Amino acid sequence: MERGLLSRAKEIFQLESEAINNLSFLLTEDFEDTVKTILHSKGRLVISGMGKSGHIGVKISATLASTGTPSFFMHPAEAMHGDLGMLTKDDIVLAISNSGESEEILRIIPLIKRMGITLIGMSGKKDSTLVMASDYFLNIAVKKEACPLQLAPTTSTTATLVMGDALAIAIMEERGFKAEDFAMYHPGGSLGRKLLTKVSDIMSSKALPIVQAESSFQEIIQTMTQGKLGLAIVMKEGCLIGVISDGDLRRALERNDKPRFEFLAKEIMTSSPKTIHENAMADEAEQFMLKHKINDLVVVNDEHNVLGVVQIFDMGRVS
């Protein structure tokens, strides 16, 4: 029985995958024209759909809004009871109906056209009423639903979602939308916090573990212990010349027979340590540390003065 269920699940995956792949053969110049029209619009892209198409429409609208295209969802039934007032002549309406004959959608089409609003129809029936009334047509036709009764929207809603994603991403790329822009719309998410948080916001800057080039082994140990950062910053005449990590201490003791109390900071340190500017973003600092396989960065300002230390562990406070 279980084996049959797994087999059926795989059949559904295959069926819906084929439907998605087939969308590329249904694309026409209307897709390009739709993207260009939206890019040049001074208004919002308003999504409308009934039932399952409406649920998918809500997601498409959210994706558009989060990637730089002002958008909201308008329920077609509510539109007939006042929500049409949300529309302006500069807006564009994307109406979704697999059959192209959804009663609620057809009822608002004449009103949308009367307002002079551009109408984009997303449907699986190219000769439907919706498509005939639309300025542009996005074809989401599928051969069959995954539902064995051919009643529940399944494959068709998957195709609708994918077409919506293709539209949103195409517009996003044409706008030159960047990760920093995405972060502005997602300040509460982990990515947003990383891209909006500066190194200076998370660095350790109080009681920094600073030693001098001539500092003794004992001084280094005491400073590192008090600093609680697992490293010491080595300075000479006010300038940064190196850092000493726990690993540097172990390596110095392993490769040299000299008594530990004779070691000086300048003999143990890693010279020319990696630094990062105080105004760099947290995400940049994290990527830099991962690239160079290090856990710490000394934070400096324009004059290369030492301001603090940021560690890979600090990124957990941003995520």
Image (cartoon, helix red, strand yellow):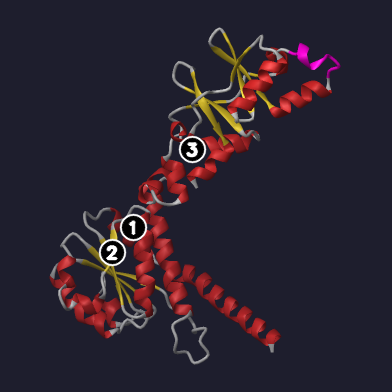
Image: 161 above or below 223: below
Which residue lies under the disc numbered 2? 72
Task: Tell me the CA gap for discs 3 and 2.
Answer: 32 Å
Q: Indicate the amino acid at tag 1.
A: Ala
Tell me the amino acid under the disc marked 2. Answer: Phe
Q: Are marks 3 and 2 in contact (CB under 8 Å)?
A: no
Residue furthest to the top in view is 237
Q: Looking at the picture, how far across and down is residue 124, in whole percent?
A: 39, 79
Residue 282 tag number: 3
Asked whether disc 3 touches disc 1, contact meaning CB atoms under 8 Å apart, the reply is no
Give percent across and percent down for residue 32. 36, 60
* Residue 258 among those drawn in magenta: yes
Q: Check disc 3 and give the amino acid type.
A: Ala
**Dot placed on the residue nearer the N-terminal end, 3 or 1:** 1
Q: Which residue is mark 1?
A: 65
The stretch in magenta equals 256-263
Q: Position of residue 100 (x, y in %)?
A: 32, 81
- Secondary structure at badge 3 equals helix
Residue 114, percent across and down? 13, 72
Residue 103 in magenta stretch: no
Can the viewer see residue 109 in this picture?
A: no
Check disc 2 and report its element: helix, strand or loop.
Answer: strand
Residue 22 vs residue 98, the one in the foreground: 98
Q: Residue 284: give its label.
A: none
CB-based contact (under 8 Å), mark 1 and mark 2: yes
- Residue in the picture at 47% in, 74% down: 158
